[in-house]
């Protein structure tokens, strides 16, 4: 240890000579400057000479890198694709109220939507607007065209796991036939059912009824849950608030968002045991509102993905960078129905003057673009061949008719005859489009010297009694109303004289022997060509008698987020709720997937 200590003590101490250090630093600095001058400054001209080559080289390298990136991207695109995302939540805004979720009582848009999504039918409408099998797998008709044998799927189940059978169908028909049920479905009296086995049921008609298969589009109810409930109590049963169906979605819960209004949310979840396949959407929400303005606000506030029941003004205010807007015709028509038994309109001359004095083209300009014209008691395309043409708008001819009939203008510019002024009582059913065109229509009639007194009829509010006080007793001269015609051209319920009763739907009180014969016989034949000929004969007589003026074919407007893959605008709709014909394929959002080689 002593030796080590001596060793350390013998190490020389550092001696820093500042002058020497400065001389060395100046020497190094000089060498650096000389090298920089020699290898950079003197060679700068050489760099400028090769500058172009350097730039070309850099650009070439950039192009090569970009091309490589594009090649990678193109290769990725060749084996990747954008696909609709699964398990999304779809929220639709529409008009309420929601008084019952039992489909036999579905009246409002929200109730009808819930009915379609939760309940099955024997037949429904496909994307082309034609009848298609739902529960049914086969339908056969006997030689008398009065016995229909329906075979249904063996794999259909209620959402509580119980098997759906032909007994459920017979049970539902029995409810519809019982007047105590007070369902929205009618026309089932006189039809008997016979359950052959769990998957087979027979319907026996008293006589041939050509449109019968269209009546098989009714929702089926579960017998095992409602069998012990009296028909009079079905509506008030707890099933109406907690339903069990067999459709693609099943009930989860209903939320009262605002107790002072009809703002509610119906929550539905995917039915994984649905016989028709599994929906891509995990959840479906039906948001109900009091008015179309409330629906428009819900869209702008992103409360919903989609909406229907919007007015033309609300449609025009929709943000089109966020939403797609579709307008599709439905199998319904808007009419000015003329009460042929009222004191004034029992005169056919006045009805014909109104017919040629109404400019339906100007009326359609107030409606969404593409609203079709309609002048027959049928929708466009239901008749073929020698179809009657539309009456031509001719106000001069209308004026001449009224003058020749003795209706002269008085000092108030109102036509008068034998001391009676030509004033029409016009009732308009509460509907955004009908109310929107009312001023245009009455203005046209006013220019002919025909005065009007208008009133709005709310058929959904039972407290007002408009059905009992106005509609049933035909307490109007003119009724603006939308008639739901359907996929089959059977319009017997609207124009046959037998339906001109308090409970009937012949709101014009129209009666003509030729029309009656054509309508009644058309129902009794199944040959399409013969039915078409009879309906053309009826259409000609109808246009001559003028029990109504066709204003336009109704449309439905649908607004949907661009982030959703939902309604196909090429679909043919019988009614607005048929937009769900391909709901199993609806989705929200998208993601990248790899293609199968």
Image: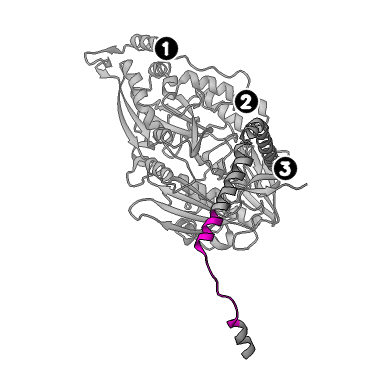
Q: In front of the other: label 1 or label 3?
A: 3
Q: CA distance from mark 1 to mark 2?
A: 30 Å
Label 1 sits on a secondary structure element that is loop
Q: Which mark is residue 394?
A: 1
Camera-side residue: 169 or 57? 57
Camera-side residue: 265 or 169? 265
Q: Tell me: residue 3, above or below residue 318.
A: below
Q: Are marks 1 and 3 in contact (CB under 8 Å)?
A: no
Q: Which residue does the image show at 54% across and 44% down from the upper left?
A: 563
Label 2 sits on a secondary structure element that is helix
Q: Which residues are magenta?
A: 8-25
The first of marks 1 and 2 along the sequence is 1
What color scheme is it? one colour
Instruction: Give the x, y percent position of residue 515.
Output: 53, 25
Camera-side residue: 543 or 524? 543
Q: Which mark is residue 532?
A: 2
Q: In front of the other: label 2 or label 3?
A: 3
Residue 529 included in the magenta stretch of the image: no
Instruction: Report if residue 216 is visible in the image.
Output: no
The first of marks 2 and 3 along the sequence is 3
Residue bearing mark 3 = 75
């Amino acid at each position: 240890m002593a030796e080590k200590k001596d060793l350390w003590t013998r190490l020389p101490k550092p001696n820093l000579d500042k002058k020497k250090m400065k001389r060395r630093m100046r020497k190094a600095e000089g060498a650096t400057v000389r090298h920089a001058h020699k290898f950079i400054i003197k060679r700068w001209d050489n760099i400028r000479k090769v500058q172009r080559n350097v730039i070309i080289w850099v650009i070439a390298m950039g192009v090569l890198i970009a091309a490589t990136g594009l090649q990678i991207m193109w290769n990725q695109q060749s084996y990747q694709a954008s696909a609709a995302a699964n398990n999304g939540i779809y929220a639709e805004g529409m008009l309420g109220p929601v008084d019952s979720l039992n489909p036999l009582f579905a009246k409002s848009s929200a109730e009808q939507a819930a009915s379609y999504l939760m309940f099955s039918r024997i037949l429904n409408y496909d994307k082309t607007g034609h009848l298609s099998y739902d529960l049914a797998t086969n339908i056969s008709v006997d030689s008398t065209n009065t016995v229909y044998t329906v075979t249904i799927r063996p794999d259909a189940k209620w959402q509580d796991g119980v098997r759906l059978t032909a007994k459920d169908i017979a049970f539902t028909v029995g409810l519809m036939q019982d007047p105590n049920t007070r369902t929205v479905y009618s026309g089932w009296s006189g039809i008997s059912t016979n359950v052959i086995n769990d998957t087979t049921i027979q319907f026996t008609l008293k006589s041939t009824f050509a449109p019968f298969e269209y009546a098989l589009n009714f929702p089926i109810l579960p017998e095992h849950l409602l069998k012990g409930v009296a028909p009079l109590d079905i509506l008030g049963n707890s099933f109406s608030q907690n339903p069990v169906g067999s459709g693609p979605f099943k009930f989860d819960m209903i939320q009262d968002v605002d107790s002072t209004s009809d703002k509610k949310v119906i929550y539905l979840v995917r039915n994984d045991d649905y016989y028709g396949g599994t929906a891509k959407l995990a959840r479906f929400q039906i948001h109900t509102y009091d008015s179309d303005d409330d629906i428009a606000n819900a869209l702008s506030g992103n409360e919903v993905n989609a909406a229907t029941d919007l007015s033309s003004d609300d449609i025009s205010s929709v943000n089109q960078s966020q939403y797609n807007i579709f307008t599709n015709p439905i199998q319904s028509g808007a009419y000015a129905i003329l009460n042929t038994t009222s004191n004034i309109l029992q005169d056919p001359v006045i009805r014909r003057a109104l017919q040629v004095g109404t400019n339906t083209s100007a009326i359609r300009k107030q409606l969404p673009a593409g609203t079709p014209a309609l002048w027959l008691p049928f929708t466009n395309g239901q008749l073929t061949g020698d179809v009657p043409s539309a009456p031509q708008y001719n106000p001069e001819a209308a004026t001449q008719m009224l003058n020749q009939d003795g209706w002269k203008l008085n000092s108030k510019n109102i036509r008068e005859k034998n001391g009676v002024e030509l004033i029409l009582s016009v009732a308009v059913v509460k509907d955004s489009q009908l109310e929107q065109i009312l001023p245009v229509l009455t203005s046209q009639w006013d220019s002919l010297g025909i005065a009007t007194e208008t009133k709005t009829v709310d058929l959904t509010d039972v407290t007002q009694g408009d059905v009992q006080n106005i509609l049933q007793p035909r307490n109007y001269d003119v009724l603006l109303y939308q008639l739901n015609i359907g996929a089959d051209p059977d319009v017997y319920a609207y124009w046959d004289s037998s339906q001109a009763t308090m409970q009937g739907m012949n709101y014009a009180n129209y009666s003509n022997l030729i029309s009656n014969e054509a309508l009644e016989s058309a129902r009794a034949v199944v040959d399409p060509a013969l039915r078409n000929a009879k309906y053309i004969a009826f259409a000609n007589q109808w246009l001559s008698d003028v029990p109504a003026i066709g204003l336009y074919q109704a449309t439905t407007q649908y607004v949907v987020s661009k982030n959703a893959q939902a309604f196909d605008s090429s679909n043919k709709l019988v009614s607005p709720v048929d937009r769900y014909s391909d709901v199993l394929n609806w989705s929200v959002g998208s993601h990248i997937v790899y293609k199968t080689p």
